[in-house]
Amino acid sequence: MTADFSVDQQRRLVTPVPGPRSQELHARKTAAVSSGIGVGLPAYIERAGGGILVDVDGNHLIDFGSGIAVTSAGNSAPAVVQGVRDQVADFTHTCFMVTPYEEYVAVCEALTELTPGGHEKRSALFNSGAEAVENAVKIARTFTGRSAVVAFDHGYHGRTNLTMGLTAKNMPYKHGFGPFAPEIYRAPMAYPLRWPGGPERCAEQAFAAFVDTVHSQVGESNTAAVIVEPIQGEGGFVVPPLGWLRQVADFCAEHGILLIADEIQTGFCRTGDWFACEFEDVVPDLITTAKGMAGGLPLAAVTGRAEVMDSVHAGGLGGTYGGNPVACAAALGAIETMRSEDLCGRARSIEGLFMERLEQLRSKYAAVADVRGRGAMLAVELTTGDADLVPDPTATAAISKHCHSEGLVTLTAGTFGNVLRFLPPLVAPDHLLTEALDILEDAFAKVLG
Ligand SMILES: *Cc1c(COP(=O)(O)O)cnc(C)c1O
């Protein structure tokens, strides 16, 4: 790593976590912010860089979350900061639909170049992942003249009405928020650990179950799109077996169904490739991106085949802020950093460093039912340790809590809340990752030992 960080890359605790100033702020939060907005670790942050978050009490915390896979290129990455500074001084907004600007076009050109497939492409920019997913569905419906959308068990696509419908998990995402949009259908996910026929038969049987869902419950000719995360994010970093995604893609192509790859969490070097679909040479018709793309500024995109993207009537897509120039400048800086620092290669080396340690945990604890993921998107699934694979969300939460108190910011995930997931910034130096894995090992010993 050649990066020069503004924040000292050392874990340092000077108070308990959260400390007194964070606790004061948290009392203000409780009085002013809706309790519907939850907080994982109430340590209030005032600076960040590389793999470190500095809280208001002066604690240096190691970041294993990247703000949910967003600050892959680092927090306040120098090229992002420079791009944003220059842009914010030039102009902050015109609305691209009123009077356009180059930065928007440049981000779309980068998406054409970086996303899978050498075909002619177009993109449209939005503010959030959920908004990109909504627009991908709108585009797919217009192009195909069909209405049904098929999503998968354990899938996560956002919190707006349409995307809540696409998201599988009830609590906390959907509970009490219905009714949801119609014409959404759900197929079983190829989840090797939990596949009833066993992991060896998962690819084949899950594909057959998917085909059966589309054929008997929806009808191929009614299906506009199938939306899939190549590796599921909130659903617990579920990695489908090799071959499954390719079969799903081929089935879609055969029936004129558009394949939407939701790469909002997996995209932009996170899994060791620019996009996770590349691992199996799958070329989706449409791809949704957000999170890692813009170094922390809100920006999302739909990129796809030119004929699909251009099938929408003029003025049919857009929004006041979509592709805001400051967010676009941030994206250009983040992408430049990913290229110049080879962050895809860095994600693969992070995988090597983590996997060795996580596999040690698997061999030591029966409760570790699975270690999985790719690149710097890695997870451990915890059960009570018996053959029935009963999820253990309590131990998962306890391990995460222990990490928090030691100054390591960890996230959980999974439909059953029993997955610890690791999403370090790709620029975090090895010594921090190693120290964090030591903390994790201690947490396992305390909770499971
Ligand atoms: C986070 C996420 C979304 C939603 O993105 P927001 O920006 O939170 O709306 C959609 N799909 C996937 C796979 C995600 O991880």
Image (cartoon, rainbow, N blue to C red):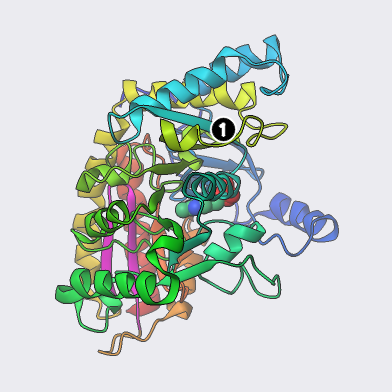
Residue 298 visible from this viewpoint: yes
| Camera-nearest residue between 220 and 334 | 220
Indicate the position of residue 114 as horizontal and vertical percent values.
34, 29
- Identify the magenta region: 368-383
* Quadrant where the image shows the C terminus: bottom left
Up/down of 381 relative to 45, above or below = below
Up/down of 88 relative to 161, above or below = above
Residue 399 visible from this viewpoint: no
Q: Which residue is most to the right?
A: 31
Principal secondary structure, stretch drawn in magenta: strand
Q: Residues within 10 Å of mark 1 (few under 14, many from 20)?
A: many
Q: Which residue is most to the left?
A: 200
Q: Quadrant of residue 39?
A: bottom right
| Camera-nearest residue between 73 and 157 | 157
* Location of mark 1 (residue): 125
Left or right: 356 with respect to 27?
Answer: left
The residue shown at (61%, 70%) is: 172
- The residue tagged with tag 1: helix, strand or loop? strand
The residue shown at (24%, 54%) is: 250
Q: Quadrant of residue 387?
A: bottom left
Left or right: 124 with respect to 373?
Answer: right
Magenta residue check for 374 = yes
Beta carbon of the mark 1 residue lies under 8 A of ligand 1: no
Indicate the position of residue 72 as horizontal and vertical percent values.
43, 38
Indicate the position of residue 62 as horizontal and vertical percent values.
45, 47
Residue type at mark 1: give it.
Answer: Leu
